[in-house]
Image: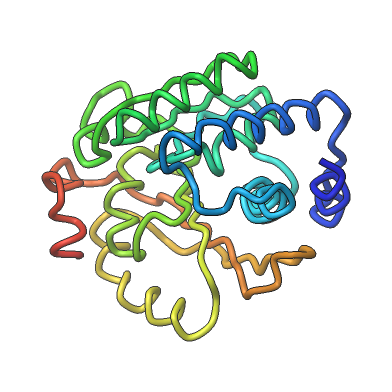
């Protein structure tokens, strides 16, 4: 994990030997499971260190260096665990909720949490549109993570309901004209769901020079009970 260790310094992070060993175990398990199920198309050892592990950690400088202590974090559409699990490895005090609709991927997430010896990690199998209405999950998180999830109008509808007022949604995006168009198309969703764009953080790290940004959206009002709408509607009919 030398590449990850060196690149993390550019984000202001010093990863110690136990953390790097945990990332090494994560990679080995990811590569092994990926031979039996489609977890990721990026599986080359150097690429995973940068495009999955390091990219996940770009949230920390976007939020001033770290997440709030003991923050409750939800990763919506967690897939193979990015960005939630790498952030948990770097900041073990987090309480992490992983939301994944595919049962096999959810099984991998449970396996990884157990293999890495992580506490305060819960995996929920199901659609975010349904889970966001459960009382123990709705408006109870400080931060929602969305990486490769959807365009902003859809993304906001299936993440903001998980976040408490004053919390944030962090969305991994690419900058430029495409992002400007997404932000413009998200105005109604922001107004309806109680969100406000706090900042757009340009990622600066070796290997991630493709105009990546982390968009931070603050929850300024409670989300109406009607949202998110039923399964599939946020994608088919974005706000």
In the image: residue 10, left or right of residue 92: right
User: What residue is shown at x 47% (from left), y 64% (from top)?
Assistant: 197
Name above or below for residue 177 compared with residue 161: below
Location of residue 88 in the rendering, given as x and y in whole percent from the top left corner = 63, 30
Location of residue 196 in the rendering, given as x and y in whole percent from the top left corner = 42, 61
Farthest front residue in view: 35
Farthest bottom residue in view: 177
Q: Quadrant of the N terminus?
A: top right
Tell me which corner region of the image, top left, top right, bottom left or bottom right, holds residue 28.
Answer: top right
User: What residue is shown at x 77% (from left), y 63% (from top)?
Assistant: 205
Near-viewer residue (205 or 217): 205
Name above or below for residue 224 compared with residue 115: below
Q: Quadrant of the C terminus?
A: bottom left
In the image: residue 206, left or right of residue 238: right
Location of residue 61 in the rendering, given as x and y in whole percent from the top left corner = 72, 53
User: What residue is shown at x 73% (from left), y 26% (from top)?
Assistant: 22
Name above or below for residue 143 compared with residue 41: above
Q: How is the image coloured?
A: rainbow
User: What residue is shown at x 30% (from left), y 42% (from top)?
Assistant: 161
Location of residue 176 in the rendering, given as x and y in whole percent from the top left corner = 53, 82
Near-viewer residue (105 or 7): 105
Tell me which corner region of the image, top left, top right, bottom left or bottom right, holds residue 130.
Answer: top left
Total marks shown come to 0
């Amino acid at each position: 994990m030398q590449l990850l260790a060196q690149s993390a310094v550019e984000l202001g992070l010093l990863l110690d030997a136990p953390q790097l060993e945990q990332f090494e175990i994560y990679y080995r398990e990811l590569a092994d499971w990926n031979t039996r199920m489609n977890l990721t198309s990026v599986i080359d050892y150097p690429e995973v260190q940068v495009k999955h592990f390091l990219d996940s950690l770009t949230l920390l400088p976007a939020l001033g260096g770290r997440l709030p202590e003991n923050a409750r974090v939800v990763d919506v559409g967690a897939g193979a665990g990015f960005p939630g699990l790498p952030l948990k490895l770097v900041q073990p005090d987090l309480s992490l909720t992983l939301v994944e609709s595919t049962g096999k991927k959810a099984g991998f997430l449970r396996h990884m949490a157990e293999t890495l010896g992580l506490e305060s990690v819960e995996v929920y199998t199901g659609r975010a549109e349904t889970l966001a209405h459960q009382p123990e999950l709705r408006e109870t998180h400080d931060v929602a993570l969305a990486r490769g999830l959807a365009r902003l109008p859809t993304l906001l509808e299936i993440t903001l309901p998980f976040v408490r007022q004053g919390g944030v949604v962090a969305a991994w995006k690419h900058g430029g004209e495409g992002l400007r168009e997404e932000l413009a198309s998200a105005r109604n969703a922001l107004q309806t769901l109680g969100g406000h764009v706090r900042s757009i953080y340009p990622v600066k790290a070796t290997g991630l020079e493709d105009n990546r940004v982390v968009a931070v959206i603050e929850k300024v009002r409670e989300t109406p009970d009607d949202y998110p709408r039923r399964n599939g509607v946020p994608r088919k009919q974005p706000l």
